[in-house]
């Protein structure tokens, strides 16, 4: 039997043994330039080394034949929607808090969850999240997981924001400024802010919890008095009402007046307003 039947090569020297008979048909030309198989395999070894270096440097394998279309088909087969509209994300977020070490067992408060949903699901934000998920080629399962984890991270910051709000609550700040008759002083400060037309603006900007702003609003409220509440000023200029002992003396005067004895509405309202200001300093 011809011992060259499977190599398909010709004897290297025209009559002797073919040293490169291991090369399959069609690849015999690879032996050209090599006197011995050892030289051929040495070059093959160097090529494999270059292949490994290229893979390490670029993070890719030069042997891969996958195209963008192949990757697209693979992601689709794994569960990635065709476009952003294909993601089915929760209508609302609820879950646990994120910590620097990762997910925790601590449940987010309803108040924190409301803040998270304000930024994660309201106003088209859910659709924006879906758009980003599609750009990252996330599968439906991956998008669901990331949606929950991102909400946990937002909830962590929301809880911190809520804690800061609690520390600067107007009621607490007022109690520190005026421990006695806090409600009456707060009412005076609100009246001053309202008279200046800044009530809503101070709340929206967060300045309504600033002690200095509260003091200024309180001083303005005191200077204006309660002319309309007492039915004295109508739509005219404000009439200042006294406080403390001066308010007590004025209250006695009003109560002793003929108008008060005749149940005059203006006198009665003025007496009520003065009564509320007796305890103010």
Image: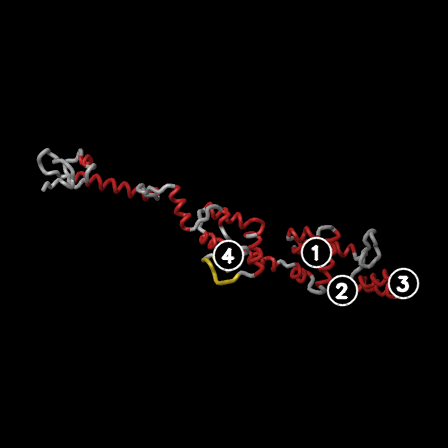
Q: The N terminus lies in which quarter of the figure?
A: top left
Q: Earlier in the sequence, mark 2 or mark 4?
A: 4
The quarter of the displayed image where residue 54 is located: top left
| Badge 3 element | helix
Mark 4, residue position: 152
Q: Callout 3 environment at 10 Å: few (<14), some (14 to 19), or many (20+)? A: some
Mark 3, residue position: 259
Q: The C terminus lies in which quarter of the figure?
A: bottom right
In the displayed structure image, the side of residue 249 where residue 44 appears, left or right: left
Please say if the residues under marks 3 and 4 sit with CB atoms less than 8 Å apart: no
Q: Earlier in the sequence, mark 3 or mark 4?
A: 4
Q: Earlier in the sequence, mark 3 or mark 1?
A: 1
Q: Nearer the viewer, mark 3 or mark 4?
A: 4
Q: Nearer the viewer, mark 2 or mark 4?
A: 4
Mark 1, residue position: 215
Q: Nearer the viewer, mark 3 or mark 1?
A: 3
User: Residue 162 at what x, y percent from top left?
Assistant: 58, 58
Q: CA distance from mark 2 to mark 3?
A: 24 Å
Please say if the residues under marks 3 and 1 sit with CB atoms less than 8 Å apart: no
Mark 2, residue position: 279
The quarter of the displayed image where residue 208 is located: bottom right
Q: Earlier in the sequence, mark 1 or mark 2?
A: 1
In the displayed structure image, the side of residue 169 where residue 121 appears, left or right: left
| Badge 1 element | helix
**Numbered badge on residue 32:** none
In the displayed structure image, the side of residue 275 where residue 202 appears, left or right: left
Depth check, front residue: 256 or 36: 36
The quarter of the displayed image where residue 253 is located: bottom right
User: Residue 234 at what x, y percent from top left?
Assistant: 83, 54
């Amino acid at each position: 039997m011809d011992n060259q039947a499977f190599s398909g090569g010709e004897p290297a020297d025209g009559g002797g043994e073919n040293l490169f008979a291991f090369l399959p048909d069609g690849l015999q030309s690879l032996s050209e330039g090599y006197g011995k198989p050892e030289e051929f395999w040495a070059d093959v070894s160097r090529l494999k080394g270059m292949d490994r270096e290229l893979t390490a440097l670029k993070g890719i394998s030069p042997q891969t034949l996958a195209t963008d279309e192949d990757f697209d088909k693979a992601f689709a087969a794994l569960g990635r929607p065709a476009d952003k509209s294909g993601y089915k994300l929760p209508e609302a977020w609820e879950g646990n808090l994120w910590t620097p070490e990762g997910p925790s067992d601590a449940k987010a408060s309803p108040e924190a969850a409301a803040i998270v949903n304000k930024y994660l699901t309201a106003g088209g934000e859910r659709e924006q999240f879906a758009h980003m998920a599609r750009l990252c080629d996330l599968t439906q399962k991956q998008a669901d997981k990331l949606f929950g984890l991102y909400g946990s991270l937002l909830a962590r910051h929301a809880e911190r924001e809520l804690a800061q709000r609690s520390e600067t609550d107007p009621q607490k700040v007022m109690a520190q400024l005026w421990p006695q008759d806090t409600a009456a002083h707060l009412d005076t400060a609100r009246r001053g802010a309202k008279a200046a037309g800044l009530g809503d603006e101070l709340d929206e900007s967060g300045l309504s919890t600033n002690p200095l702003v509260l003091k200024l609003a309180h001083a303005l409220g005191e200077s204006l008095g309660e002319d309309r509440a007492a039915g004295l000023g109508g739509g005219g200029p404000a009439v200042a009402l006294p406080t403390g002992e001066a308010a007590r003396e004025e209250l006695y005067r009003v109560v002793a007046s003929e108008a008060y004895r005749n149940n005059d509405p203006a006198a009665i309202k003025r007496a009520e307003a003065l009564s509320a200001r007796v305890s103010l300093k």
